Amino acid sequence: MRQYMFKHKFLLVTTVLVRCIGAAMQVYIALLIQQLIDYVVGGDMNGFVKAILFAAVYFSLMGLVDYLTSTTQAIYLKKTLIALKRDVFKGILAKDYEDFNKSNTADYLSNLTNDMNLIEANYITPFLMMIGDVVIFVGTTAVLLWINPWVTLAMFLMAALLMIVPSLFGKVLEKRQNKVSDKQGMFTSKIKDIFQGYEVVKSYRMIPSVTHEFNVVNDELEDAKFKSTHLKGVAQAVSMIFAIGTQIAGMAIAGYFVLLGQMTVGNLFAVVQLGNGIQGPIMWIMQKVTQIKGMSGVNEKIMALIEVGKRESNEVALSEFKESIRLENVHFAYEETPVLNGISYTFSKNKKYAIVGESGCGKSTLIKLMMGYYRDYEGQILVDGQDVKNPIPLSMTELASMIHQNIYLFDKTIADNIFLDQTFADIQIKRALTQSGVTKFIKLLPEALKTAVGENGKNLSGGQKQRVAIARALIQEMPILMLDEGTSALDLQTAYDIEKTLLAIDELTVITITHKLSEEILSDYDEIIVMDQGQIVESGSFNHLLTQKGAFYQLYTLKKDDDFSVAS
């Protein structure tokens, strides 16, 4: 974390310098009070008037310095937090697919919001303020020694008790601060889940139950925050007791020397004022040290994300697809649950493949492996004879586009969701819009491609969202197109039209997962791959598989009555 605090050195130095000037000016107030009191006690009207006029100018300057302190600190915090959030965001996106999905997205939201607020309030800001406290302490000590060393010694002996506060409360506060961070993440996750499931909540009379769930996580969060704040309060109270003792000790010794005639009344008032400069800084420094120590867990979590973003990607993007994708005895498991069991198959360039099978048989996992989403499989996946995992990991991002089963659209326009911040030639745009069927429905929209889709495309129908996703994939003009139920939200006729178009593209390898066992569609595929329990049990053309009367025949017979036939 310290590297970010020193990232903007000029701003940091400026902030520290201005804060030090302000702190030193606070120390001098005690000497100013001493002068005023001594002028009053001595009956020196002329000196008193001069001191008052000087005080007026002095306090005006203090106001200016205070403004500069808050301004420079605000600028420094802004720059530091921008850099910190940027690198945390980069680290989150740098995670591989499998590692990213091990955490809830709400946890990442919490990292970028709640944890950043905690770092600002309990780490960076206390550090800056502590610098001023140190200056006040050093300056106060110097002035007290000048006034009377014995008074200084007495105050130091009492103030030393403040040193034990961090050791008493530091570890416990760290645990409670970590718990606050965890509970904030759970709270964010629950809210996100409820709001995203709003339609289900309304449709199934779930308001009482989700309200109860909200109340539980809300209560737990506020309870964790209360316990953390309460402990801070206890630590502060203990510090305050020791601080008051420090000030009383200083006043007692100073008063004794005034009675002996070895100090002036002005000196006594100065000691009273300076007492805050001894016990106050020590008390606040100890409290801030406790706060900073309590942030170690949160800091470690954030820095771990940042380290992920610093790692240089060791993947090499494949730029050309010449022959085939070949799987050799591929095994894969989610945690300890086997999903793929000894898959061996070759997908040849420019051929069209349909993968069918019951839900949970491993179809989606198979194409995710080929896309490089998971690397912890056994066996080999070879692209044009090159192992995508060894010795150098190879990336499919330049070779293959994928249309996912669950379409996600960003809260932007249709055009934004298709182009994805890239620039394409007019002919590419026209071709992608036509092939995907987007051209048909955007004619009915007042703003056409500039139509806002809303959060996750809520302004579009399921079929429209799917066509946008198809256009998004096609416009990239990759040699490989993979579809995970890529036309499932479309009516059979529209699905048929789009798939016919895709299958007619000669220079395109198509690998489709489908549940629509329509002869009109499946008969156009070069190969139909039948999966069952993580294995390929059959493959061949539509007619060949029907003739064999094996696994595909059983599937087709069971489901053909559920699908409407499309007239040719």
Image: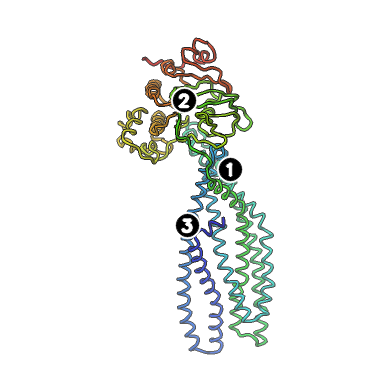
Q: Which of marks 2 and 3 is nearer the N terminus?
A: 3
The residue depicted at 60 percent of the width and 56 percent of the height is 229
Position of residue 279 relative to residue 32, above or below, is above
Residues at circles 2 and 3 in contact by the CB criterion of under 8 Å: no
Residue 372 position within the rendered picture, expressed as x and y whole percent measured from the top left? 52, 33
Residue 92 in view (yes/no): yes
Q: Earlier in the sequence, mark 1 or mark 3?
A: 3
The residue depicted at 52 percent of the width and 10 percent of the height is 548
Q: In front: mark 2 or mark 3?
A: 2
Instruction: Indicate left or right for 156 with 542 as reference.
Output: right
Which amino acid, mark 3? Lys
Crowd rating for badge 3 (residues with CA inside 10 Å; few <14, some 14–19, many 20+) = some
Label 2 residue SS: strand
* Image quarter hosting the C terminus: top left
Position of residue 487 relative to residue 115, above or below, is above
CA–CA distance between discs 2 and 1?
Answer: 46 Å
Residue 352 position within the rendered picture, expressed as x and y whole percent measured from the top left? 44, 22
**Residue at which label 3 appears:** 79
Which amino acid, mark 2? Ile
Instruction: Indicate left or right for 156 with 445 as reference.
Output: right
Q: Which of marks 2 and 1 is nearer the N terminus?
A: 1
Instruction: Indicate left or right for 174 with 531 as reference.
Output: right
**Residue at which label 2 appears:** 511
**Residue at which label 1 appears:** 216
Residue 564: name its quadrant: top left
